[in-house]
Amino acid sequence: MNPDPEQRIKRIMSGEACGVGPALVRSVLAIAEPFYSAAARLRNHSFDSGRKTVKSLPRPVISIGNVTTGGTGKTPAVRWLAERLRDEGRHVAILSRGYKSVDAGLGDELTMLDRALNAPGKPAVLVRANPDRFIAGTRLLEQAPETNVFILDDGFQHRRLARNLDIVLINALEPFGFDHVLPRGMLREPLTSLRRADAIVVTHCDRVSAEAIGSVESTIRRYHPGVPLYRTHHATSAILEGAERFPIAELDAKPFFAFCGIGSPSTFDAQLAGFAQIYRGHHWFADHHHYTPADLKFLRRAAAEAGAERLVTTEKDWVKIEPLQSELSLPVCRVEIRLQFEDAGEQKLMDQVRAAMAS
């Protein structure tokens, strides 16, 4: 059971890590925080005042983003919205910055989305990666003029492109970046920016108490009193092995060893906790880890030592593991995660989306 590097950083930022070393790191990071915060405020003011240009695409744009770095469950949310819009007969395209993409290709998260959304027999959902989302959208419309709605992936801070609706995700487990802006905390911009949100989706609500969720929502209301709030959780809906899809209960069939390289491995760990009797151990890599044959040999050995008969990972990690799977002698299955809303939240948010598109 190894400590993930990003989790060590979080422990320092949150104050959980004690001692002279962590305290010194926090002090150094705190020196830089006001400069980063001021730069974010200045940038936002330049857009709010009209001094910076905002470009518009000739189609509705729905943005899904967050105010903290990683771990909010953005990819399942983008998938949920794309599927809902497609099922309503829309021609959907996703525009992303393409983090970790190479040579205008798709990175691991976008490749996973592309595969999940474009299974045989389903209408296509086009996925494009480009730091300039306006150029990406313009080029896409030249190739596919039937596109009638764009989803802006990780778009809250991408203010150069106009949008009809801003949906912001907040992780109930680590909601406000330990109350500090980067680099001292995990906030991308000050919480006053929440006033730009048209809807806020609180994720991982099943992982915290009702009192904790109430506290998160109270904090949001201080900055944006009237914003619609939605509660969700991320459910393990199935396991995938090769091209086969099985009910999640099938994970109970064999002892397994888990691994991943995502922003919030503790969430993945909790999703597997229901299978504690056969959950033999795990190894967490850094977010967006680039796997090597040596990594897979290590995993094979760790799984064998733990008495596991197969490996379990995320869909995002499988994208990078698949070309190297010959290095493994154990089967690998990945867990499918779906966004699920509480109460009537899903229908209410979709009503908001439709109204924004119509406007």
Image: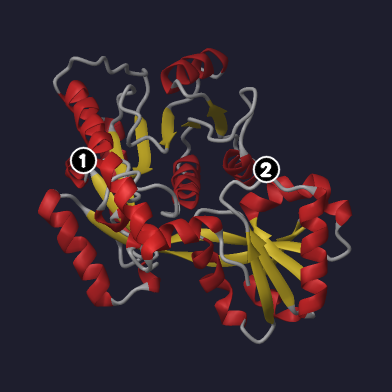
Q: Which residue is mark 1?
A: 193
Which residue: 32% across, 42% down? 188
Position of 269 with respect to 25 (left or right) is: right
Q: Nearer the viewer, residue 8 or 252?
A: 8
Callout 1 secondary element: helix
Residue 350 visible to the viewer: no
Q: Residues within 10 Å of mark 2 (few under 14, many from 20)?
A: few
Callout 2 secondary element: loop
For the residues bearing labels 1 and 2, Cβ distance under 8 angstroms: no
Q: Which mark is residue 121?
A: 2
Q: Which mark is residue 131?
A: none
Type of the residue with mark 1: Ser
Q: Residues within 10 Å of mark 1 (few under 14, many from 20)?
A: some
Position of 109 with respect to 153 (left or right) is: right
Q: Residue furthest bottom?
A: 277
Which residue: 21% across, 23% down? 47
- Residue 288, horizontal then vertical, whole percent: 59, 46
